[in-house]
Amino acid sequence: MAPLNSGVKITVYDDYQKSWVSLNKVYLEEARSYRWRTRSKQAFQFHMQHLSLPMNKTLEGWEGIFETPFQSGIVSFAITSQIGVDYIDNYIYTDHRKLTEQQYTILLDDLLKEASICFQQSGLETNIAANGFTRDLSMLQWMYIESEMYKLRTIFLKIEKHPLRNLRKEELLMKRERVKTVTPRTIAWMERYGETFGATPSKLPSHIQTTKVEETFDVYENRVILLQLNDLEALLKSYRTLHDVDIQRKANQFLDWISLWKKGEFLQKIKPHTGTVKITQVFRKHSVYRLWYQWFQSLYQFKEITFDLQQKLSLKDTYLLYEMWCFMQIIRILREVDLLENTAELFTKKDGFYFLRLAENKESTVKLKNGATLTYQKIIQLNTSPYYSYTQRMIPDIVIDYQDQLYVMDPKYRIPANLPMALGEMHKYRDGILTREDDSRVVKEVYILTPTECDMPSEEDFYDSRFHQRYHMGAYWFSPGEELEMFEEWVRKLFSFS
């Protein structure tokens, strides 16, 4: 840990290790409480994300509790005393009971992949070409850099300890007294060319050709690493120009890291690779170089589609990304059964750039070939038409409008209490949304989408198709990396494909 400017060292109790761990090294998960303490008795202030944390004085120093937000991503702490200030960053991981780190990565990849396909099918590509459109920066790409840069640093440090190298052999003509080793190749050369350099039966030649073996780091994979560091450096300099203090600060920090990395001994006497980067056997199979290659592969995937930078979240709202992912997965299913007609409304153009338009409280509608529509964050209130709510403003997350009936899906990344209670809240949609024409109820079926399988026997029925058919409500398992067979079957039955 770096020297303390504040003079205050804070440790946090790690439930996994069952021990007290430094604040910058403790494993944090979203929506959890953590105990902290310090042996320092001097007065200080402790901030998390610029918010002051309460603390209690003890005989040994100070202690308190902080709660991580219901989000994942970089979290910033500040410790301020009369001596100075310490800024400490850590990472909040997704709730392991809901999504693993691998599933979270799959969630982002799936979201981008389907958005890219819809973008290509929307008919907007002509406008892009005509306007010289570029997609160099994106919020999702920055979110990836911000959350995964610490992993890249770990990978680089491992490479720096044991970089790839090879032995370079060079034939040199040297004075005989400087030759240290004689090989059969050297003897063969003297027999053939020795007389030219004054050799006699009793005398060695004045100069002898020998093989000089030199260790070098100038291998293809190291040249690629230097190229990718240069590219990432240029990318971070672009993010640094944005009018966002948090992004500027983090970009400067990451640029300092890269500047230090490029001074590594194994990168000093090599030149960056030029041309197309190809995946070699080393990048395929080497335990560490493979991770480096995969990191940059993921980085450039985010150039396919982007979020508006004004939708910046310094900590990523996992529940919001999960809602978007569920919506895009439903779009994927509809695309695979050839029902998508127009996806242009998913995108918006601003300052010459196209952005994915999914956002809270803003309707985004996809038209289907059979006259149905799929809407994200559909707004229904007293003055909306053809459907209205006579009680309160309602914004169901995902709505299918088909043959004058609504089918509501509500993604629940984490159910606050239990599934029965969450399903009970879904009755507000079934009872409170009416048609303006004759005040009849319009919501036919309601379902909760969750990333976890049922883990309680009392809730198994909610996932069963027979329960769905009988009560027209229930739950579906929507988890990144898993098949959505039951929901796909429901979609096919709804639109008479089976």
Image (cartoon, rainbow, N blue to C red):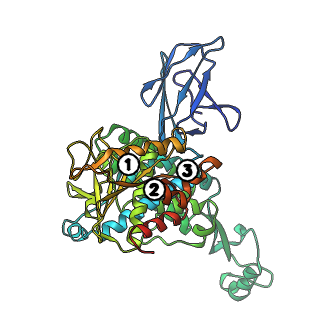
- From the viewer's perspective, is residue 245 above or below residue 492? above
Q: Residues within 10 Å of mark 3 (few under 14, many from 20)?
A: many
Residue extending farthest bottom = 192
Q: Which mark is residue 389?
A: none
Q: Earlier in the sequence, mark 1 or mark 3?
A: 3
Q: Earlier in the sequence, mark 2 or mark 1?
A: 1
Residue at the disc numbered 2: 472
- In depth, the one of 247 and 394 nearer the eye is 394
* In this view, the mark in front (3 or 2): 2
Q: Amino acid at mark 1?
A: Arg
- From the viewer's perspective, is residue 371 above or below residue 347? below
Q: Earlier in the sequence, mark 3 or mark 2?
A: 3
Question: On the rendered image, what quadrant is the C terminus found in?
Answer: bottom left
- In depth, the one of 2 and 268 nearer the eye is 2
Give how far apart the Cα atoms at labels 1 and 3 are.
Answer: 30 Å
Residue at the disc numbered 3: 99
Residue at the disc numbered 1: 430
Query: What SS does tag 2 mark?
Result: loop
Give how far apart the Cα atoms at labels 2 and 1 are.
Answer: 10 Å
Residue extending farthest right = 202
Q: Is residue 269 shown to the viewer in this render?
A: no
Give how far apart the Cα atoms at labels 3 and 2 are.
Answer: 28 Å
Q: Residues within 10 Å of mark 2 (few under 14, many from 20)?
A: some
Q: Amino acid at mark 2?
A: His
**Residue 427 pos. (x, y %):** 41, 45
Q: Residue at x 53, y 71 (%)?
A: 279
Question: Horizontally, is 194 left or right of 30 in the view?
Answer: right
**Residue 98 pos. (x, y %):** 56, 48
